[in-house]
Amino acid sequence: MTTVLFAAGDAAWVEYAPHLRHALAEAGIAADLVTEARPETVDFIVYAPSSPLQDFTPYTRCRAVLSLWAGVERIVGNQSLTQPLCRMVDPGLTEGMVEYVVGHVLRHHLGMDRWIKGATGWEQIVPPLARERRVGLLGLGELGLACARALKALNFDVAGWSRSAKSGLEIPAHHGDAGLEAVLRRSEIVVTLLPRTAETENLLDARRLGWLPSGAVIINPGRGALIDDAALLAALESGAVGHATLDVFRVEPLPDDHPFRSHPRVTVTPHIAADTRASSASRVIVENIGRALAGEPLKHQVDRARGY
């Protein structure tokens, strides 16, 4: 019998337990799914970085820690975690992110805020066609590529950037400092979908924000630390950035008195762009358990050196 310890909190247990049990039965895996167990008996840990479990040293038999979160910055530096760590790549989360990004890109592309807020007069401002609107995707992982494909299917002129070279993609893909400048200088709408690492923190600082076309829009459903808050506020005040739609922040919940809350050219959404769905995420977790039991490589295993 395989012992699977669920260490992601009581609320998540209520949500996930039936889906995990169903997925395990469907996969034909005989497992004891529990919230408490002697560490030396645990084979797998289903995990959330907010869990009280922070010392993995006693879990000597554990074959993998399977996170329910897409982001791993809160756990990847834990020195006691020597077991393989897998991040969550959930089809449901991906679908939600695509819908959020496409929705807000279309909103800004069409200039919908002007009319939603009740503009007066009869100024017939007709937006360009999507093929005439240049969109930049910063981050070409699972989420970034899914969003890029969806936007390309709507005929947007999409280019992407990643920290390392990518090839064989459906869109122009850039990397490195020169590539980042090239993408930012061309992009009227920029979407940030990068993980938080030492290299990506404050990636969009004052200098790089200055590379954007005047009045460009930023959509950030990735990580709050990707953007220098003070530099963004200054760019919004000067008009260098026309609007920022932000779903993630350095401090969450975003304090009521934060300048983003009241800024007329900032849209704040409360970290709702995408969430892990218990039904689909449970199948991802169980697939990795099955792969480990069969001696196959784990999917979505975190590269500790790169931080994601």
Image: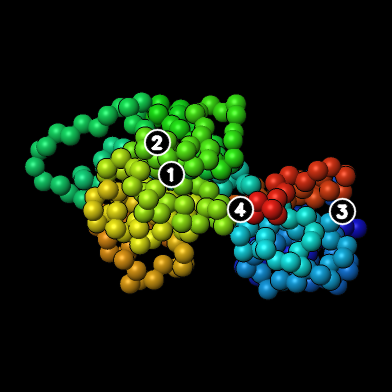
Task: Work out whether mark 1 precedes mark 2 in sequence or the reverse, and give the earlier one.
Answer: 2
Q: How many marks?
A: 4
Using a 10 Å C-alpha cutoff, classify the residue at mark 2 as few (fewer than 14 neighbours), some (14 to 19) or many (20 or more): many
Q: Nearer the viewer, mark 4 or mark 3?
A: 4
Residue type at tag 2:
Val
Q: Are marks 1 and 2 in contact (CB under 8 Å)?
A: yes
In this view of the protein, which residue sits in the foreground, 216 or 67?
216
Q: Which residue is mark 2?
A: 135
Q: Which secondary structure lies at badge 1?
A: strand
In front: label 1 or label 4: 1
Q: Residue 172: horizontal and vertical position, in percent?
A: 49, 29
Which callout, 1 or 4, points at the residue further toward the start of the chain? 4
- Cβ–Cβ below 8 Å for labels 2 and 4? no
Disc number at residue 209?
none
Q: Picture coordinates of residue 285 (x, y %)?
A: 72, 51
- Say which of marks 2 and 3 sits in front: 2
Nearest to the observer: residue 91 or residue 141: 141
Determine the secondary structure under disc 4. Answer: loop
Q: Which residue is mark 4?
A: 70
